[in-house]
Amino acid sequence: MSALAERLAQIRSAPAGDTVCAFFDYDGTLIEGFSAADIFKARVLSLDFTAGEVRDALLIGLRGCSSEQDYAEVLEATRPAFAGRTYDELLAFGEELFRSETAAKLRPQMWQIIRAHRARGHRIVVASSATRFQIEPIAKEIGADRALATDVEVVDGIVTGRVKGRPLWGPGKAAAVRRLAREWNLDLQASFAYCDGNEDVPFLEAVGNPAAVSPQRGLRGVAEERDWPILDLRNPSYNTVGKVLRTGAFYGSFLGGAAVGMARGLFAGDRVAAMQEAVGEGLDVGFALAGVDVDVLSGREYLTSARPCVFVFNHQSKLDLPVMIHLVRSNATGVVKREVSKLPVFGQILDAGGVVFIDRADAGKAIEQLEPVVEKIRDEGVSLVVAPEGTRSATPRIGAFKKGPFHIAMQAGVPVVPVVLRNAGEVMWRGAQLINPGTVEVRVLPPVDTSEWTPERVGEHAEQVRELFVQALTDWPVTAFDDGRMTRTRSVFEWQESADEQ
């Protein structure tokens, strides 16, 4: 049994309830690498840095940190990244940086561990020496009950960059954990902690169930000596040349299918049907060549029994739409922003496939622009395939649902069929250009009747459907894959001050 499988088994057998807590370090634990590097990269790209910052960063990088004083010097060196900005500006900066850079470094295995703790009713806490601007986004994403962070001083709404209280580095982090245990009346002996750094031995010693996550050499030695679990959670690595070849074969099969569809359309009475059929066949071949399996675990019958309908799916990856085409097969349409119609080749393929193009920039006419889709569903009996999140989520978390797809279903008088996808984000992560081999798991949920829906409550109906996705992912059986894949379950967040332990 792998170390990850053993840890999941230990979590399942742990006491249930909120007196048990799971504490997670951020840099090197929840994510691979360090978020400070993303901050520095963003500043370099924007030319918002000084020669002194570069010098200090290089010196600190070479020397490393061996004490709280060393870490205080790190914070002082990064002070220009924060000083002089408003608190809200830094929160927005941290959120944007997380979405564009850091989210791609999340360890999928840690989602699995977090989900296992949630299933036991354990509290979830992010405990990091980083600033709150760095860890607030991840804390929100995983639904943390509390975040323990190194805080910085704010005067009249402006951040000075000076550390407020004790940095949560090493002993400071352990002290923050003990304070929180007193506040929440936690059973620390039954609680869990996860980190990767040598400085965090006191943090791991504060709980009864520590684990070293892909640890640095010093922590690895301590963990081996004390018989602490060591979770080597390196993300799966695949031969780059192989990925390029597989990805090329996938797109080649898609384009080949589209070419066949164009040719068939010249002679067929229904060019849209000819294109959809041929593209579906091309994608079948493409998935096989790319080493991607699409496994429908439950509800396959709802892919056909509820038509015409509005199929809604959670959106993480560029593979999501190909997966949906593979599942739905034919007699369907989609909604795409008008700019896509101008893309060479791809725009023409979508047009031939019966997609409806709308102008997202004209939000005032959103409902009016959806009328052609409603007519296609109502008059031609086609089904709509759409991602209600609107854009790809940066993590396995389900984003907010837009109302448009649900207005369409209500006006067309057809049911909504939720299609829940898992692992697509690990097979082809957001922003990635290459495909990894793997399995995309699918659960098709029972159709949701819309006959009693009203326009005034469509937002509530959208949220109810979103909760079906959240619950489905929450109830998904926890497995012991070493490459891990999971989702968070709820979103509760508050900040913990980092003052010295009394």
Image (tube, rainbow, N blue to C red):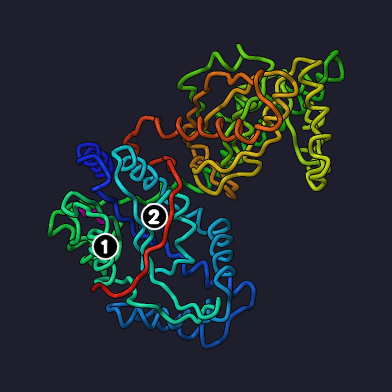
- Can I make out residue 80 in this image? yes
Viewer-side residue, 256 vs 453:
453
Q: What type of secondary structure mainly makes up the magenta span?
A: strand
Residue 432 picture location, percent across and down? 57, 49
Local secondary structure at mark 2: loop
- Front position among marks 2 and 1: 1
- What is the quadrant of the C terminus in the image? bottom left
Residue position marked by numbered label 2 in the rendering: 30
Q: Is residue 358 above or below residue 263?
A: below
Quadrant where the N terminus is found in the figure:
top left
Q: Does 71 sit left or right of 396 as displayed?
A: left
Residue 194 is one of the magenta-drawn residues: no
Residue 62: image location, x then y, percent: 38, 80
Q: Picture coordinates of residue 392 (x, y %)?
A: 60, 44
Q: Amino acid at mark 2?
A: Leu
The answer for how far apart the CA atoms under marks 2 and 1 are is: 18 Å
Q: Which residue is mark 1?
A: 177
Verify CB contact (< 8 Å) between mark 2 and mark 1.
Answer: no
Looking at the picture, does residue 487 appear above or below residue 127? above
Disc 1 marks a residue whose amino acid type is: Val
Front-lying residue, 42 or 361: 361
Camera-side residue: 333 or 457? 457
| Residue drawn at x 16%, y 57% as measured from the top left | 224
Where does the magenta region start and end? 209-213
The answer to whether any part of residue 292 appears in the image is no
- The local secondary structure at tag 1 comes to helix
